[in-house]
Image: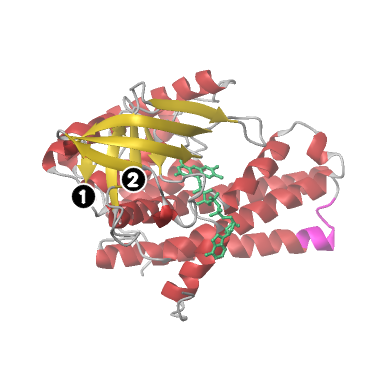
């Protein structure tokens, strides 16, 4: 792919930089609820100015921009150290899935409130016995008078405590082979049959939850992509999750690397050959991630769907981010894990990187089979 920006892409980037310079909302306030409201207001501001759903069609409230412009947006927003948006899962996964597989009514109903963060989305895929082997999930949905009645348990459901809609995958056919018996639903979280219980993480936060679902009702019109097609629709969701984030993540790594260099200077370790070698290696890896993200983008532009390159990028990013935060802890010295600092938080949060959105072992299997063409394991 040609990595030079066209005059049109440069103009897009400059306009965005100027807007971000003039509209940056400042530091996020302390506290889960205050932070969430702040991110909601920030997303609303982005949406009002036409900076949400960059590559979504204009008719559904998007900007109708190219995928390269979407990648530029992801880079610039991180470079400007702009806050996170509130409805990450809706923007990165929910919207693209409804655009790809939804009916016209679903597009009209769901897309705009995703952009403005009026309706927050969560992803109900993982279950206590089904994470990596997602197709073995047991939550069941049974048809009853035009509705589906759903019973089961989900786990690690990020933002479920804030969400109006859940992208839920449930088993609708118990006789079909396991990948073929699944259906993808949009479940309204605002019903008594859905109980959300927070889980506390190693960082002290509770960004994810357990979901207990006891005869929840979902109208038939909330099936996405057809009954029995849940596996295919879920795969699209996961590929969007991996492909969409790469550009922002590599800029985040570069910013963090600059901070590690500052930290090394502060601790008199910037001339230490081992520290310098580790920093150089992290720089090389973050460059490889940037180039691989471009390779993934080329693939999407050619075929219209994200390819397995996203799995390679996500694996490389989680390894690199974990190594980077470990280096920061080493530089700070043996007391680092017990000091309640930003680096301690980042080090602890990074442990989840090689699990969330697909574990590193599973991503390695995908890369082996689908990128390198090695024989299938089973
Ligand atoms: C911060 C965070 C947020 C999350 N948010 C969500 C969310 O919003 N919605 C959601 O649905 N899920 C979410 N998850 C769940 C996540 O997708 C799962 O944790 C992940 O898919 C792994 O599943 P598991 O935890 O059941 O582990 P398991 O699948 O039980 O795996 C256990 C270990 O075995 C390894 N393993 C399993 N199978 C194989 C294999 N075939 N080959 C080699 N090794 C294998 C795994 O790599 C892992 O090391 C989140 C997780 C985290 C950490």
- The x and y percentages for residue 245 are 44, 50
The residue at which mark 2 appears reads as 170
Q: Nearest the camera: 287 or 39?
A: 39
Q: Nearer the viewer, residue 70 or 357?
A: 357
- Report the residue at 51% width, 49% height from top: 129
Q: For mark 1, what is the residue? A: 227
Label 1 beta carbon less than 8 Å to ligand 1? no
- For the point 87% across and 44% down, the residue is 334
The answer to whether residue 59 is above or below residue 230 is: above
Magenta-highlighted residues: 269-276
Which residue is painted at 34% across and 52% down in the image? 234
- CA gap, disc 1 and disc 2: 10 Å
State whether residue 290 is above or below residue 340. below
Image side of residue 103 versus residue 192, left or right: left
Indicate which disc, 1 or 2, sits on the residue closer to the N terminus.
Answer: 2
Q: Secondary structure at mark 1?
A: loop
User: Residue 33 at what x, y percent from top left?
Assistant: 51, 19
Name the side, left or right, on which 249 lies relative to 175.
right
Asked if disc 1 and disc 2 are in contact, CB closer than 8 Å, the reply is: no
104 up-or-down from 283: above or below:
above
Name the residue rendered at 66%, 60% in the picture.
Answer: 282
- Rendering coords of residue 119 (x, y %): 32, 27
- In this view, which residue lies farthest toward the front? 175
Q: Residues within 10 Å of mark 1 (few under 14, many from 20)?
A: some
User: In front: 46, or 360?
Assistant: 360
Estimate the x, y position of residue 372 in percent, counting from the top left: 46, 78
- Say which mark, if any, is on residue 207: none
Quarter of the image with the N terminus in it = bottom left
Disc 2 secondary structure class: strand
Tell me, yes or no, if residue 15 can be seen here.
Answer: no
Residue 196 lies within the magenta run: no
Q: Residue furthest left?
A: 104
């Amino acid at each position: 792919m040609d990595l030079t920006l066209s005059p049109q892409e440069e103009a897009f980037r400059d306009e965005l930089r100027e807007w971000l310079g003039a509209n940056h909302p400042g530091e996020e306030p302390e506290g889960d609820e205050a932070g969430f409201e702040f991110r909601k207001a920030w997303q609303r501001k982005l949406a009002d100015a036409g900076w949400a759903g960059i590559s979504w069609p204009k008719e559904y409230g998007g900007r109708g921009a190219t995928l390269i412009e979407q990648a530029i947006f992801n880079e610039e927003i991180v470079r400007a150290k702009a806050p996170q948006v509130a409805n990450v899962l809706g923007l990165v996964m929910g919207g693209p899935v409804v655009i790809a597989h939804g009916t016209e009514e679903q597009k009209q109903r769901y897309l705009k409130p995703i952009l403005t963060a009026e309706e927050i989305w969560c992803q109900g895929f993982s279950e206590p016995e089904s994470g990596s082997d997602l197709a073995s999930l047991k939550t069941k949905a049974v048809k009853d008078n035009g509705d589906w009645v759903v019973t089961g348990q989900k786990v690690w459901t990020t933002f479920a405590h804030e969400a109006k809609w859940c992208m839920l995958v449930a088993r609708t056919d118990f006789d079909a082979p396991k990948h073929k018996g699944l259906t993808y639903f949009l479940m309204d979280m605002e019903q008594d049959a859905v109980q959300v219980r927070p889980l506390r993480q190693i960082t002290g936060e509770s960004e994810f939850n357990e979901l207990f679902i006891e005869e929840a009702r979902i109208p038939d019109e909330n099936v996405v992509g057809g009954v029995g097609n849940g596996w295919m629709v879920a795969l699209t969701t996961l590929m969007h999750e991996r492909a969409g984030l790469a550009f922002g993540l590599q800029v985040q790594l570069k910013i963090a690397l600059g901070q590690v260099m500052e930290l090394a200077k502060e601790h008199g370790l910037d001339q230490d050959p081992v520290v310098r070698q580790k920093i150089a290696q992290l720089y090389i890896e973050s460059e490889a991630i940037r180039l691989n993200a471009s390779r993934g983008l080329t693939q999407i532009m050619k075929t219209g769907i994200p390819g397995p390159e996203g799995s390679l990028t996500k694996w490389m990013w989680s390894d690199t981010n974990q190594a980077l935060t470990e280096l920061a802890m080493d530089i700070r010295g043996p007391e680092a894990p017990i000091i309640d600092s930003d680096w301690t938080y980042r080090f602890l949060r990074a442990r989840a990187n090689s699990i969330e959105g697909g574990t590193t072992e599973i991503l390695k299997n995908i890369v082996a089979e689908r990128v390198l063409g090695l024989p299938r394991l089973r």
